[in-house]
Image (spheres, helix red, strand yellow):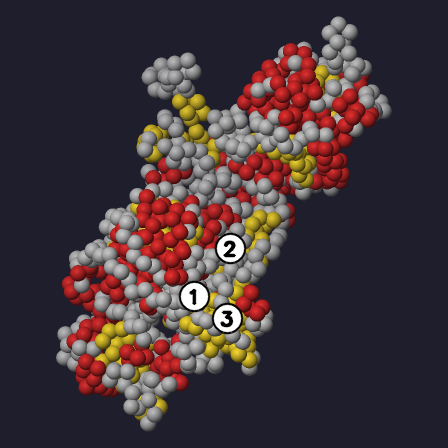
Amino acid sequence: MKMVNLTIDGKTVTVPEGTLIVNAAKKVGIDIPVFCYHPKMEPVGMCRMCLVEIGRPVIDRTTGQVVREDDGSPKMQFGPKLETACTTPVSEGMVVLGTSEKAKAGRQDIIEFLLTSHPLDCPICDKGGECPLQNLTMEFGPGESRYLYDEKMHLAKHVPLGELIYLDRERCIQCGRCVRFQDQVVDDPVIGFFQRGRSLEIVTYSEPGFDSVFSGNTTDICPVGALTTTDFRFKARPWELRSAASICTQCPVGCNIAFNTRREAVSGGKWVIKRVMPRQNEWVNEIWMCDKGRFGYHYSKSAERLTQPLVRRQGELAPATWEEALSFVAERFQQAGDGLFSIAGGRLSNEDLYNQGKLTDSLGGKKVLYGTMGGGDLTAQSGLVPGSNFSDMGKETAILVVASDLHEEAPIWWLRVKQAAERGAQLIVANPRPTRLDAYATHLVRYPYGSEAGALLAMVNTLSAKRPDLPEAVANLVRSPELKAAAKAFAEAENAVILYGSEGTGLETSTALAQSCQNLLLATGHIGRINNGLVAVWQRVNDQGAWELGWRPVANLPEAMQAARALYVAAADPAGDDPAYLAEGRLGSQEQAFLVVQDLFLTATARLADVVLPVQAWTEREGSYTSGERRVQRFYPVVPELADSYADFSVAGQIGKRLGLDMEIRLAGRTFARLASETPAFTGLSYARLAEVVEQWPIVGRGDLYYGGTTYENSQGIGVQLPLTSAGGLSWPKLVEVGMPKIGLLAVPITRLYDHGSTLLPSSMLHQRIPEPYVVLNDQDAERLKISEGAAIQLIPAEGGSWLGVRAIARLRSDVPERIVLVPRSFGLPVAGPTVVSVRLAERVLA
Amino acid sequence: MDADTGLPSQSQNGQYLLLRHRDTPSIGELEVYRRLGGFEAWQKVITSMQPGQVTDVVKTSGLRGRGGAGFPTGMKWAFIDNKNWPHYVVANADESEPGTFKDREIMEGNPFQFLEGVAICAYAIQANAAYVYLRGEFWQLAAWLDRKIAEMEAAGLLGEKLFGTDYSLHIYTHLGAGAYICGEETAMLESIEGKLGQPRLRPPFPPSYGLFGKPTVVNNVETLTNVPLIIEHGAEWYRSLGTEKSAGVKIFSLSGCVERPGNYELPLGTTFRELIFTHGGGITGDRQVKAIMAAGASSALIVANEEALDTPMDYESVPRVGAQLGSASVIVIDDSVSIPWLINKTMHFFKHESCGKCTPCREGTFWMMHLTERIVEGSATLEDVELLQDVANQVKGKCLCALGDFSTEAVLTGIERFRPDFELAVAGSAVAN
């Protein structure tokens, strides 16, 4: 890369060719003030705040040499006008004056102009205290106004762009950052400028308003108080807030976030969370986060939280002391011995899973990860190597996204994959139906639902001499030119990454898919190098961590549970997810196993339990999660713990202690240390190591005049990516033939971002985005079955059982394959994998 | 016709070169235009000239942009990036500058010569599509041009494989939605792309990054209307018209306090005096000429003294009296007009038309309008005049495009050159109060 030397305010700077002056300055600690420029977006030069004087050496046209003054210094030529530092790339020998009288006067002029139309309502503005307009006015603005107050234009101050984001038109300085973010960064062009001149205003043109899962980010980058979130609007002043580093728990990306809290009278003097902000991690979420993470945290402070242990007495759950409850549980676990069956959910932290696992293992019991996705052992063998970063992927990389509606499953990965594609990466999208990622794909592969593993094996087949037989459903795929081209692009790319999700898959099909993915990576030599490997788009934040610690899902949970003498269910609600557990009396009846439920809420499963143990939310404690990219990241206590409450790891540890086990019950860090000493992939890790930070670019979050947004600077840890465990090998996956049924339809599960999960529903501000339970049918099928859009339907599984208690709204789409019913997870219909069903409308069986 | 050479001459009494409908009212009919030699240049370039040769002829002719900037037309065509395809031509028919009404007359009266110019330009840069961007109020004109384009297509003058070659060209009209800023070439490109009409950052300039991000030549209607004649009669002939550095004829849109306002097609270098007094019939009534705005509302105010009146109207001479020729829309101001009143009118215009993209123009025009409003109302003081001058200087040189700077021209030159008018306005307020 060619380097360029220049001088900015007397400081010599050497930066790569093409660097903008504003960034070159920032790199040596000089803040050139900006409003419209943002380091993550293309410059537009609209606000004119970054005006500087620029001198360029005079070049003799005949000789091509720099003309020198008598003293030998290069003769400089300054332009007659100030120039914008945000749009001007550096050039050799350039001299930039940002603090000359002329430049300073220019900035004062711009500030004065902006203030003529600004309401100056800082005392009631949510941005006050972290507002660039405020800061730059203090630094550069004129001391008094020459503009007559009566000539100000007054505009609407409470304009809902959607139910999540409000616009104050008076405060808007028309920098267009929000519009450009939506257009350029996330490609949801749902807001724009309307009118012109002083009447220019931001409007939304989507229905519902501001229909984008990234909308909250616009409030971070808005350099004034024009855009605010419903969550934080008029709730607190920024300077009253404390911040604590945390990790978002809504998906496997593990976005780094910061919680802002305040101790307030209106909450009875308690510390309460006022908002969630992104925290910079250029390897994970850069400076962004999605709205599910930003607005979906409210469950942690729900009034429905359990506050004390419950023990069943005379058939009723009644409050008990911790001592009573834990001793009772320990006694029964002891009796159960190897009949202890532990079920843990992927939202538990590494420490929780470690302690619960330790307890279960020491009794010889069975550890089950609650979920329907397989392959976590393979992602540990063939995953991303430490140092990998989606931001570094471009032309030399191929990214294959298979069986995933990434925009719904993990929005930030969708964004990062999209951006890699825009930088020139080969993007192969393999999915049975169109998704939002298709628009950026260089190759599209369609396969029938249930044949995802076969489709990937078909790709391997086109590349290798050994051609194993393929299932009938995908046999013709091998001849598909699209698939061949995709396989070729994947094989020829220097680096290649596969993300596999759970679109339409259950545990068996997902396990086979993961193995096929690994085969493709091995066959093309894309393992063990930076920016190569396999990533699972898990359904929970710490599913990968659970796999690392030896937890595995089982194919048929109800059946596997039959042998259990005691059930220890943490952060999972099987009875809530599948009413069959209730109907068939598999849980909670006297002759069944002793049931302990450890959770935040009194779930459907908890209602059946013999003992219910409350726990702390992740905002009340320390811990760590392992992301889908196998990055182990710490989260910190945000608010004080509830009285007499414990974290999951401590509850498990206290049960263990009563069984005579040596377990950590107080400190998450010490638990992690034990985990690290016993788990090879975690060797050498400690909380201190996870808390290490490095300088990141762009620089954000400081009280800068060069303003990147209110995203928090990362000062509490960027986390550590785990090394690969022993290398995996080629193996022929156990393919499950999922054929079309002779009669009926095939119901397949899909993931939707705004779902009915228990960690989302308590956030009432998102309810408008969370649909009623629904299924999606092919429109032709629907016509045949006489089901109209919006009709209430029921699904009847062909293999027996009854879901008749669950109704769903039918949505009709032409891009759903024929005879397929898409069933979103968590909406009450227990479709765990491809399932043959018939559809029933009102009282009539239709298919 | 010039008796010696047989070539058309440029005089008012001779033959019109651009406003040819004034000689031949039916020239807007295809067969009439063709009978007068129309489209021979078009056929000539396609069948016998290389694209580069066409550009060279235009370059040699000395033709300069008639939209206001006076940039050499051939040079603009030669800047087109030949490594990036396809190319586009956009004819700027947004004619929005107050006092400018020449393009409309050309398109209404002599549409084929204009369209032939568009076509020749397209051939020169090997564009297969050309857009005529008309201001929204020209909707009837757009329909008229659409008919003329359809006639050309029916006659095999536009469309696929023209004159038996592989070259194809389509011309489309595109209506704006009523924004002055869309006359700025990059805002115009945004508008054609269906976006909000706001100027782009320059560089890159349209010849490298234009319509839909492709190399594009944007030329004014009048500029393009000259082109068929240059091809037909040669660059040397064209150079013989006008002055050495400002070749050719120009349509001067004369308006304001004159007896005979209207379009006057005259050689570049004609003096203000000749335009106003010989052709325009002089000042209305027995008043004296006080000021001249040579480039519409964007114009500096020229003090109409004897020296100014004798200044030739070409791109080099007008700056000597502290103004620009611009689009040559000459607004004559007589001594009955108060300069603060005039400036207030221009400020209302610029405040209304500022696109709002950059801060100084958006906020500055709004502020200046309020100040001039108070000055003409008589509720201002001399400090407000100073403030107005300050604000104008604050806007000047800091804007994203030229509109902001233009908005300050009349203000700054008005206060500087006609200060007594402001003192009177302010004093009037003292009396009124």
Q: Position of residue B45 (x, y in %)?
A: 63, 21
Q: Secondary structure at mark 1?
A: strand
The residue where tag 2 is placed is: A227
Amino acid bearing label 1: Ile
Q: Position of residue A739 (x, y in %)?
A: 41, 67
Residue at left 17%, top 73%? Answer: A663
Dot placed on the residue nearer the N-terminal end, 3 or 2: 2
Answer few, some or many: residues within 10 Å of disc 1's Cα (few below 14, many 20 plus, some between 14 and 19).
many
Q: Secondary structure at mark 3?
A: strand
Compared with A132, A732 (above or below) is below
Compared with B24, A812 (above or below) is below
Residue at left 75%, top 23%? Answer: B34
The residue where tag 1 is placed is: A750
Pair 2/1: label in front: 1
Q: Report which quarter residue A697 is drawn in.
A: top left
- Discs 3, 2: same chain: yes
